[in-house]
Image (tube, coloured by chain):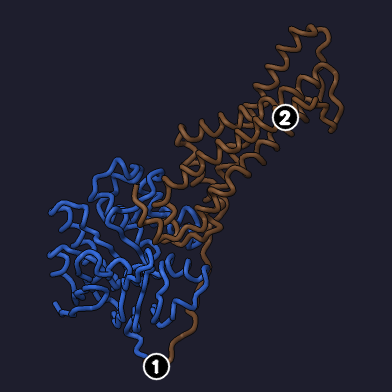
């Protein structure tokens, strides 16, 4: 056998963000899993946003300094942790269920980072939706409870509320990404041979 | 070296370590497969067919020996180059089709063009043409679950050839199909092999598939037992 070539005239594989988005959205349409994740994030963020909204509409809001009492902080942290663990759990099941698909994508030319991107996009979308529903629910609960306890005339609605809404969504996106990191990493580094050996 | 060979295996071995035991899945395989050849790999389960497939397909690395695809030692390739090889040079067909369940037939077939960097509209047009050519022009927007096994395998074949690979690796492509559908799939693969000069390497138990091939490689215990010309 004579001289062998070192490299082919090898090109690059591509995976546009819009294609990753499209594939992620197809999976998000599997409603059961998406609803569980959005629900977990909603519950996780609801307590946080409810307390700040409540402080804000009663006029206790103090800009970036969040006037939590210590027992409130503990409750908020605990509810967020539970939410992260729950989302991570559902994402991990989703990765296991999609072993075959991940292996196939890799056979078709996907790189590890492409698989990572698909799962992280799903996490971000779920974070946005969960954050939105969580803070809307939080706002209404805060509004109603404030109306009952201090009366309508003491309620103050200002542009701060919009800022709180945006912060809540940002925080829930962060929570969702933290929850998805390990499952997405496991999916990304999955060897196709292993993936196909694993039959459900 | 002769450029007529698209696949060359040199003293290829693959060992697995399982529970302190060494399993020789492949043991010193030497094989050359020519461009446009149709080769069937036959052997009992556990004979090393799938491991051999994974090696040729760049999905697994040999413990010893070399795999050359079109003259390139694929152990020297990095992850990016291997991905390109899988995307452009090799088409994979599986026993259980491995279609993406959330995508339609058309989107499944067009998927490899995404990784090849083909514009979306062009990719979908190519996919539509290919699906029509395999007789599924009226099933473009059906999801895999809505298709019969034979139709799913046709979709998988269209997906395997959309980036015009030089090699098709088919692992038991008729294993999950009834006799009549199996024959149709064999005819389709054989036709592609002849009309597009795609090198076809198929692991199979199917006698009809074996009969249609140019060469039959019999494997046993990780070694080539004999090679027959059909």
Residue for point 29% across, 45% down: B138
Q: Is residue A20 left or right of residue B206?
A: right
Chain letter, disc 2 residue? A
Q: Is residue A158 visible?
A: yes
Q: Which chain is brown?
A: A
Q: Is residue B228 left or right of residue A55?
A: left
Give the colour in which the image draws chain B.
Answer: blue
Q: Earlier in the sequence, mark 2 or mark 1?
A: 1
Q: Nearer the viewer, residue B98 or B187?
A: B98
Q: Nearer the viewer, residue B131 or B26?
A: B26
Residue wearing tag 2: A74
Q: Is residue B111 left or right of residue A85?
A: left
Q: Nearer the viewer, residue B154 or B63?
A: B63
Image quadrant assignment for residue B45: bottom left
Asked if residue A140 is positioned above or below residue B50 in the image, the reply reads above
Residue wearing tag 1: A2
């Amino acid at each position: 056998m004579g001289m062998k070539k070192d490299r082919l005239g090898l090109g690059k594989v591509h995976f546009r963000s819009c294609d990753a988005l499209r594939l992620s959205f197809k999976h998000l349409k599997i409603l059961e899993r998406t609803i569980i994740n959005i629900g977990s994030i909603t519950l996780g963020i609801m307590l946080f946003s409810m307390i700040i909204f409540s402080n804000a509409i009663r006029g206790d809001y103090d800009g970036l300094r969040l006037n939590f009492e210590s027992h409130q902080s503990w409750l908020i942290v605990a509810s967020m942790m539970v939410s992260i663990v729950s989302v991570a759990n559902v994402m991990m099941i989703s990765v296991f269920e999609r072993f075959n698909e991940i292996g196939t994508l890799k056979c078709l030319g996907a790189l590890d980072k492409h698989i990572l991107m698909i799962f992280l996009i799903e996490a971000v979308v779920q974070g946005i939706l969960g954050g939105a529903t969580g803070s809307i629910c939080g706002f209404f609960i805060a509004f109603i409870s404030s109306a009952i306890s201090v009366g309508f005339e003491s309620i103050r609605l200002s542009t701060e509320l919009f800022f709180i809404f945006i912060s809540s969504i940002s925080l829930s996106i962060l929570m969702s990404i933290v929850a998805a990191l390990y499952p997405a990493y496991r999916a990304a580094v999955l060897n196709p041979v292993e993936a196909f050996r694993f039959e459900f | 070296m002769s450029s007529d060979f698209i696949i060359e295996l040199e003293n290829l071995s693959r060992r697995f370590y399982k529970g302190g035991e060494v399993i020789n899945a492949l043991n010193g395989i030497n094989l050359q497969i020519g461009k446009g050849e149709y080769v069937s790999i036959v052997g009992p389960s556990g004979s090393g067919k799938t491991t051999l497939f994974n090696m040729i397909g760049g999905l697994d690395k040999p413990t010893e020996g070399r795999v050359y695809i079109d003259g390139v030692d694929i152990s020297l390739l990095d992850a990016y180059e291997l991905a390109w090889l899988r995307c452009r040079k090799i088409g994979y067909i599986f026993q259980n089709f491995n279609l993406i369940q959330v995508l339609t037939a058309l989107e499944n077939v067009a998927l490899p063009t995404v990784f090849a960097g083909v514009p979306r509209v062009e990719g979908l047009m190519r996919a539509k043409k290919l699906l029509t050519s395999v007789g599924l022009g009226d099933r473009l927007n059906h999801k895999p679950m809505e298709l019969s096994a034979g139709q799913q395998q046709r979709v998988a074949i269209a997906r395997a050839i959309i980036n015009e690979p030089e090699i098709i690796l088919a692992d038991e492509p008729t294993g999950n199909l009834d006799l009549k559908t199996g024959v149709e799939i064999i005819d389709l693969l054989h036709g592609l092999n002849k009309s597009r000069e795609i090198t076809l390497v198929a692991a199979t138990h199917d006698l009809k598939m074996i009969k249609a091939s140019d060469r039959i490689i019999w494997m046993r215990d990780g070694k080539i037992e004999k090679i027959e010309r059909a």
